[in-house]
Image (spheres, rainbow, N blue to C red):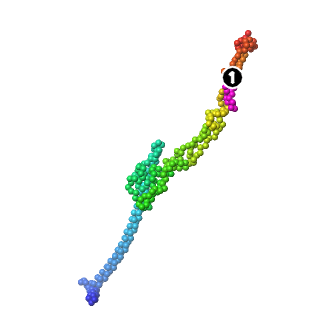
Amino acid sequence: MKKILLILLVAILMISSFASAKTPEGKPFKEIWDAIEEHDDSLRDIFVTKNVFNRTVNSILGKIHDLQEQINNILEIDQEQDNNITALENRIAQLEERVAALENCTQDSCGQPICIPSTEICGNSIDEDCDSIPDDNCSSQECVNGQTQSCFSGNPVFSGIGECRNGTMACANGLWGPCVGAVYPQPEVCDGLDNNCDGAADENLGSTTCGIGACENTMPNCIGGTLQSCVPRTPSPEICDGIDNDCNGVVDDNCTPPDGTLCDDGNACTLDDTYLSGQCAGTPKNCDDGNQCTIDTCDSNSAGCTYTSVPDGTNCGTIGYCTSGVCSGI
């Protein structure tokens, strides 16, 4: 303890001696000491300024870091959107190929759905490569829990056509679950909808024929999405036209031909036979040959007109007489 006090005393004496001492040039050491203290004040100001500068720089760097993170987030979102757009464009291209294939085929060759092969995609229950096995030969079915995606377990040619709709599959325990809510082709029914997803509604539902004779009628089974009942046409009175007008299964039975219809009344003594009020009749044939020496008659059962000579010597004209049916003068 005494040594410590002695050292402090010596130090105080040295400082006091230094304060009153002078340099070889005669300048007091105190003036130099004051200059050093003034210089120290300037250095302290510089250090303070440097600290302020450092804090400002650090603040700017922090803001740059925050901006960089925001930019990275935006780039990630843009990349995700680009991926979504690319997926949609690929899907549109596939659908366009399928539509083109359907448009370019005939009825015979399009009896079964057409599948356009493409790369198999895992986890969507769609048979992209057209081998009748969905999600085969693909890399993995792993997924992120809670993730969802569109799916269609049937033939992809039907997806998005008519009533066929994609469903949704969700990821659980790192694997895709079943496809839920998808609508697949069904037998066509009369409801105005494309149930079998072939691009046409209510097609090939057939027709029904009912009634006989002139009452026969054929109607489509479905019109405008509504089932139809076949109703026979209305019968009419039988006329002689080769048609079963009264729809009793017999043609021209008890018929009454229209007035003016040509006919044959079987009478050789009539001409231009036609029906009148249901009766066949003709105009009486004129058998007068203008010869006074014959008797003109008509035989309805033979060829018609007959001419019989009057007795010879029968007067004819003013001064003549008949000979063998000929009028001769004296």
Q: Secondary structure at mark 1?
A: loop
Classify 299 as above or below 62: above
Asked whether residue 128 is in view, the answer is no
Q: Residue at x 43, y 53 (%)?
A: 126
| Magenta highlight range | 265-283
Q: Is residue 85 left or right of residue 189?
A: left
Residue 68 picture location, percent across and down = 39, 65
Q: Is residue 275 magenta?
A: yes
Dominant secondary-structure state across the stretch colored magenta: strand
Q: Residue at x 29, y 83 (%)?
A: 33
Q: Residue furthest bottom?
A: 2
> Which quadrant does the N terminus fall into?
bottom left
Classify 110 as above or below 77: above
- Say which of 39 and 57 sits in front: 57
Q: Residue at x 29, y 84 (%)?
A: 30
Q: Is residue 169 left or right of residue 31?
A: right
Rendered image quadrant of residue 176: bottom left
Amino acid on which the number 1 mark rests in the picture: Ser
Residue 220 picture location, percent across and down = 56, 44
Classify 211 as above or below 1: above
> Mark 1 sits on what residue?
300
Q: Is residue 327 left or right of residue 147?
A: right
Asked whether residue 44 is in view, the answer is yes
- Say which of 179 and 28 sits in front: 179
